[in-house]
Image (cartoon, grey):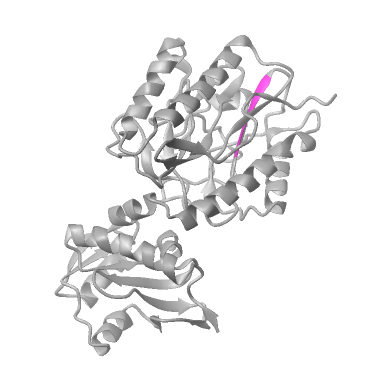
Amino acid sequence: MENLLQIPTSEATIRTNSIKTLMQEQGIDAILISDNANKFYVSGRVYNGYTYIPSNGDAIHFIRRPIGLSGENVEYIHKLENIAEILISEGQELPHSLGLELDLAPYSVVQRIAKIFPDTKIANASGIMRQARSIKSEYEIELIRLSGIKHAKSYSQICDIYTPNMTDLEFQVEIERISRLNGCLGQFRISGDSMEIYMGNVICGENADAPSPYDFAMGGAGMHPSLPVGCNGTTIKNNMAIMVDVNGNYTGYTTDMSRVFSVGSLDELSIKAHECSRRICQELSTIGKPGVEAKALYNRAIEIVTEKGLEYLFMGHRQKAGFIGHGVGIEINESPVIAPRSRDILAVGNVIALEPKFVIPGIGAVGIENTYVVTPNGMECITNAPEEIISLDRN
């Protein structure tokens, strides 16, 4: 038998207590979790089943698969209806209000749960889970730091794998290979079903200006219409910017990092824009303290870009992204969001990727992306790799 919990009991308690506090604020009696990322958050593993968290009481893990999991409050079920049956058999009162991840759960499953709990009001708990996960514990931050260290190690090997006349696809495959050998899990977990990506992007030259169906500064056309993002088979040439934005999930918690490479030198405009990106990251990491509005960081970035006369290239050229940063953790698109209409307020324990990027027509994408932890004194960078434009030229 293997223990269900793959995180310390004390850590599981911290996380469920955070959820319970938010539930009580919203008057929700219990939450039934079905999303894999949220189950991983409360237990440290992904399984087929549900986690039931009452506002007062211990979490119960209802498991279908895999067999052989043990621990306190682990119950095996064959079907959803067993959940209510077990709660009643244990003398628990069924909740008057039940939170579900309505932003994610299939309609048919929601309807089925509503029939199982006929006298229960169904509420949307998606926001509660996003808010709880946006504040990382010290345990989680250490896992993210470890991902950052391994992420930086993989990037340090990129120059060694380049060979002349490579395509962006060939280059990305080799970067993916060293990332996996260094321990990258490969999984780029994304909240919701409206965005798909495979291990990240390597985007060269004009492909950076190809509009994406997603809210990206540069998306790339991709190799096939079924996955219209990323490398498109472009041959890497002299004086072309190569943006590498590849997966940092080494611990179940991901870091997000982008760096720019080139063969030969880039033009003056590209260098100016790249240095502007570095300045934005440096300044925002200083002012990004607890209590600061996320939109204030966005607005300051726009001020810096406008001062430099680069606003027409910022966060895209033909098609622009509507943000310059986002929370990261179990998923790559968590809260808070650094955007002009964001209502998020920075807090200690937020982990944020800042990505002020530029698309230079005919050259490619420039700028950096780093992952930061919000501390009482500002934002601490945990993706410590060289930030300058890195030459792939040998000798």
The answer to which quarter of the image holds residue 350 is: top left
- In terms of depth relative to the viewer, which is nearer, 150 or 231? 150
Observer able to see residue 100: no
Vertical comparison of 60 with 328: above or below: below
Q: Quadrant of the N terminus?
A: bottom right
Which residue appears at 48% of the width and 69% of the height?
8
- Magenta segment's dominant SS is strand
Residue that protrudes farthest toward the front in the picture:
377
Residue 137 is situated, as x and y percent measured from the top left of the image, at 43, 55
Residue 347 percent coordinates (x, y): 35, 43
Q: Residue 57: x and y, percent?
A: 27, 75
Q: Nearer the viewer, residue 103 or 244?
A: 244
Residue at the outermost bottom position:
89
Image quadrant in which the C terminus is located: top right
- The residue at the point 27 percent across, 64 percent down is 20
Q: Residue at x 42, y 17 (%)?
A: 304
**Whole-percent x, y for residue 52 in the image:** 32, 72
On the question of residue 265 being in view, the answer is yes
- Quick one: 158 or 304, which is closer to the camera? 304
Q: Which residues are magenta?
A: 240-245
